[in-house]
Image (cartoon, grey):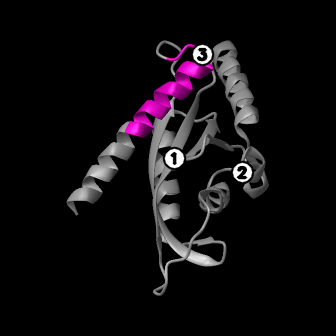
Amino acid sequence: RAQEIQRNMPRGVLPTPTLTLIIEKELARAQRYGTPFSALCFSLIRAAQKTPGPAVKFSHAACMAAVMRILSLAVRRADVIGQLGNNIIFVLLPMTAGSQAQLALKRSVKVLHARPVNVEGTMFNVRVAGVAAAYDSTFTPDANTFVKTILKALSQMERRIKNLQAYF
């Protein structure tokens, strides 16, 4: 399964172990030199087929790869994109303060929701949940705590979006 995910990853997107190492390095830089960094975290909420007709089956890994491919074109070249687990896309934003990360989040979500995504030859409208977090050494002293904090915020955002979808 891990090999399948690795094969479907678009160019420039890092697997979990490499992403974790880069997060730890960026955190060490922030602690040593006082440079800011932030992160964006996304999860796929829904993928609805755009074209009418019979429902097309696709793999979740293929959908995530398509979303990451679009996201990799939307972020800066210096930003690092990776996948954490099955449904989490993590974007590390070096030299980016919290307010700039919020702008990057809005821009990224807008890009992902603007056009259908091509998944294995079929167009799908995707909906993602996304959050931004800036590194703060007082609240998140290590990489694990930073990642857990942003994943908790993402989980809360997912619940809010799913609750909104249930009402509308």
Q: Amino acid at mark 1?
A: Phe
Counting residues from the N terminus, which is met first, the one under dot 1 or under dot 2? 2
Residue extending furthest toward the bottom: 53
**79 or 4, nearer to the observer:** 4
99, 115: nearer the viewer: 115
Q: Quick check: 125 above or below 7?
A: below
Image coordinates of residue 10 in percent, x first then y, are 74, 57
Q: Point out which mark residue 42 bears.
A: 1
Is residue 25 found inside the magenta-colored segment of the image? Answer: no
Measure how far apart labels 3 and 1 are at the Cα level.
21 Å
Q: Which residues are magenta?
A: 140-155
Q: Of the residues shown, which amino acid type is indicated by label 3?
A: Asp
Label 2: element kind: helix
The three-letter code of the residue at mark 2 reads Ile
Query: How far is disc 2 from disc 3 in space, using C-alphas?
Result: 27 Å
x, y (%) of residue 118?
Answer: 61, 73
**Residue at 52% from the left image edge and 42% from the top image edge:** 41
Instruction: Please say if the residues under marks 1 and 2 sit with CB atoms less than 8 Å apart.
Output: no
Q: Name the element at disc 1.
A: strand
* In front: label 2 or label 3: 2
Which residue matches tag 2? 5
